[in-house]
Structures are given as C-alpha cells and as structure tokens.
Image (cartoon, rainbow, N blue to C red):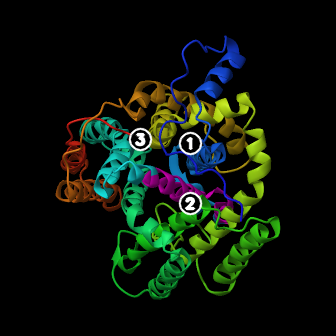
Amino acid sequence: MTRHARPSATGPMVKPAPEGRSGGGGLGGLAARVEAQTGADRDRYLDFLRVAAILMVIFGHWIVRVVVAPGGAPEAGYLLELRPSWQSATLIWQVMPLIFMVGGALNAGSWRRARADGVAPVGWIRRRARRLLRPTLPLLLVVVPAWLAADLLFPRALLIDPGVALIPLWFVAAYLAVLSLTPATLALHERGWSVPAIATAVVVAALVDVARLAGIGPVVGTQPLLGLPNFLLIWVAIHQLGHLWADDRLPVRPAGQAGMAVAGAAALVLLIGVGGWPLTMVPVEGTTLPNNAAPPTIALFSLALVQTGLALLARHPLRRALRRPLVWAGVALTGSRMMTLFLWHQLAMVVVTNLAVRLAWLPLAETIGARWWAHQPLLLLAFAVALAGCVAAAGRFEDAGGAAKGADGGGWGSTLLGIALVASAVAGLLWLGVAELPPALGLIFLIFFAAGLRALDGMRGRTED
C-alpha cells in the first residue's frame, strides 16, 4: 500500500515567508505569498475539507432561522419544524462528522510530531486545548453580558434571544473531549485496534440508541439522559476513522471508496426507513423530537461513512485543484480564521435579524413561500458582512501566539480541572437556553470557563504547535 507524506499539524496553514519573497501585489501577489508560506508537507485537501464543512455549517444555521409576519406580527421559527420535509436536507448539510474525521487525521500527525519531540501527552493536550479555547473566551465576554443586559433592559423585546449565539459551544466541548483522548486512541490505532475499537463503540452506541428510542430513562432538556454516552462513543469512533485516513488504512481504490459510501447509505436507509431512527441529522429546535445528533446515533456514524467515502473519491482531483495558488489562497486565508467564523456566525445572525426586524429594514413575508425565499440572499449577505466585522475584531485571538521556548508547568491535575471547568461552563450556558433560566447565571458559567482556561494556560512559556 502506498504511503503518503503525513499531514502537517492543525496549526497555522502558512509559515512565515522567506525573506525577500514578497510575491508582488494584487490577488496574484497575495496568492503567491500564501503559496510561499505554505509548508511543503501541508495536506491541503484536509484543510479544504475543514473549511468547506465549516462554511456549510454556517450557511445551514443561517437558512434554518425563519422570521415571518403572519398577520403583520413578526415571529421567529425554525425551518425544520415549520417545514418538516426539509429535514431530509440535513443528510447533506450535517457535515460535523467530516470535521471530526479530519480532526482525527490531523490530530494523529500533530501528536506524533509532539511525541517525537519529547512532549508528554498532558503537554500536547494542554496546547491543543488552549488553541481551541482561546478564541472562545472573547465570544463569551461579549455574548453573556449582552444577554444579561438585554434581559434586564428590554425583556422579551428581541425576536431572537442572544443565547442562540452560544449554540456553537457544543462543538467546543465535544471536540475538546475527543482531542484529549487522542494519545490513547492513537495508541490503540498503532497497535492495529482501530477497527475493533470503532466496531465496539458502534455496537454499544446502537444498544444505547435502542433504549433511548424506546423512551427508557428520564428526559433532560429535550432528549433522554440515557443517550449521553453516545456523545463520546460516536464522535470518538468518527475521530478514529481519521486515524485510519492518516495512515492510508482506508480504501485506496475508487471501488472500495464508493463501496464505503454505499455501505453507509444503505445503513441509513435501513436505520431510518426500517429501524425507526429519526430522519433529521440535527436537533429540531423548540421541540422534543428525537434526532441523530444530540445525542449522536449510529445513523450519524453511517453518515460519516458516506462522507468519508465521498471525500476519498474526490481526493485526487481536488488535490490537483488545490495546487493552484489562487484556489489554495482562498482556502488558506479562510482557514486561518476558521474557528472565529464558526464561533461568531450565530451572533452575526442574531444581531442582524433583530435590527432588521425592529428597524423595518426588510419587509417580512407572512409565511415560508416564494417571497420568503426571495429575501434570503439579501439576509445571507447581511449576515456575511456582519460576520466579516466580527472576524476583523476578534480574529486575532485565533492566532497561535509566539514560539518562545519554555516548559508548560501544568500536570494532569490542573489539566483535568481545566477541562472539567470548561465542560461545566459550556453545559451550563447551553442549559440556560434550554431551560429558560435567568441569563444572570451565565456570569457564573463565564467565570467557570475563564478559570478552566486559566488552569490550562498556566505555563512559563508559549510553545504552540
């Protein structure tokens, strides 16, 4: 089996340009500079997959948020609830499995390099956690006080609650848990146990699914408590697929890659069409309807097989396209602010929607129809402009920081404490919206998050990879 060069780490997509290579001006010059700064071993295709998936998530979140005015009174709704037939579109737009799979490939390379440099597992976990959490804190410092102020100064005046802007936090918590297990999951992989580990996780998750869909156990928020283990089982199993990708252990021939996608699709047909698993791959906001993402089900893992198979099929032609400087520059520049785009996109939507409705910037349709759809391109453009402003203001927090030498003084105690505090903060903030608790409690969870980041950030030097 042919081995490819291992992909570079999940750090910046470009390195400092060699002195004297400016690349000229204009788009061509910018593309040349980005090309010059890109490491030779960078797997551009994995970066493309991440960027494309994040942009799809952003667009999907924007389009499902519905504002109509039946009888002239503005109302906010959710497309998947108001038009259930659109739930089938989530089979295309739910691309979080692809993001976790790519994360598994990139985290494998990052941990291997760190391990070769003598970095301990706890040191690598702390570095990766800081890279994930540092861009998150500025969002919380804006949204939580704004949410509290809105609740105190003009309660019920906003059409869409500021708490909606915190929905992306679920990914922060889930990905933090999965990446923290990378040293262990990669050790399993290197012993040849990835496939048995994935199969075991899927079987256990299937048993959880059956019990959950049977209505066993209490309901917390909108979903059965019994399903909580699947947040780890399914996302870790998908992340493990990424380890297989990193070592070319997935099908290398088109027939095998297509077979992987077909097998996943067939499993989806059986699970949803025959087995009684829900159709929607995302939660239907405002309802207690079961879904395949919160918590994840084996149907979501089947979707991951489809997406991975299709990604493998498209790999060679897209890798050729990504060698073009202009194409790669678009991916690299967008990817350099990927977390900021993801974290702030809901806030951009919340602000623009509330302003547009209250200031009558846009005539509202009475229902979801041709007029409503005709307005969407203008709204999406407004959301994108607002998000660009957010990125300009907050994007710098995503920078990796300096490469000064220094030892991270934290051990497992402070690391586990930091992760626990962050997880508690995220769970609490998301719970506020579900349970409609006073936003003032968000200040407590904000303190938890900052304390957790501080526990993970207690070091004598900065050595981000």
Which part of the image, by quadrant, shows the C terminus? Answer: top left
> Taking 461 as reference, is 258 above or below it?
below
Q: Is residue 84 magenta?
A: no
Dot 2, crowdedness within 10 Å: few (<14), some or many (≥20)? many
Local SS, label 1:
helix
**Can see residue 286?**
yes
* Residue 23 image offset from top left, x and y in percent: 66, 15
Q: Is residue 412 left or right of residue 435?
A: left
Label disc, if present, on residue 465 of the rendered structure: 3
Dot 3, crowdedness within 10 Å: few (<14), some or many (≥20)? some
Q: Are marks 3 and 1 in contact (CB under 8 Å)?
A: no
* Residue 321 image offset from top left, x and y in percent: 77, 39
> Taking 414 as reference, is 26 above or below it?
above
Give the alpha-carbon distance from disc 3 to disc 1, as whole Å.
54 Å
Local SS, label 2:
helix
Along the line of sight, the residue nearer the viewer: 344 or 247:
247
Please give the name of the residue rendered at 56% of the width and 77% of the height, measured from the top-left corner: 195
- Residue identifier under label 2: 101
Along the line of sight, the residue nearer the viewer: 70 or 30:
30
* Residue 82 image offset from top left, x and y in percent: 60, 60
- Residue identifier under label 1: 72
Q: Given this view, does label 3 or label 2 mark the residue nearer the observer? A: 3
Identified by mark 3, the residue type is Asp
Closer to the chain start, of discs 3 and 2, is 2
Instruction: Please identify the dominant SS of the magenta region.
Output: helix
Q: What is the span of residues highlighted in magenta in the rendered image? A: 85-112
Q: Is residue 34 left or right of residue 222?
A: right
Along the line of sight, the residue nearer the viewer: 353 or 454:
454
Q: Is residue 96 magenta?
A: yes
Q: Is residue 127 left or right of residue 93?
A: left
Identified by mark 1, the residue type is Gly
Closer to the chain start, of discs 2 and 1, is 1
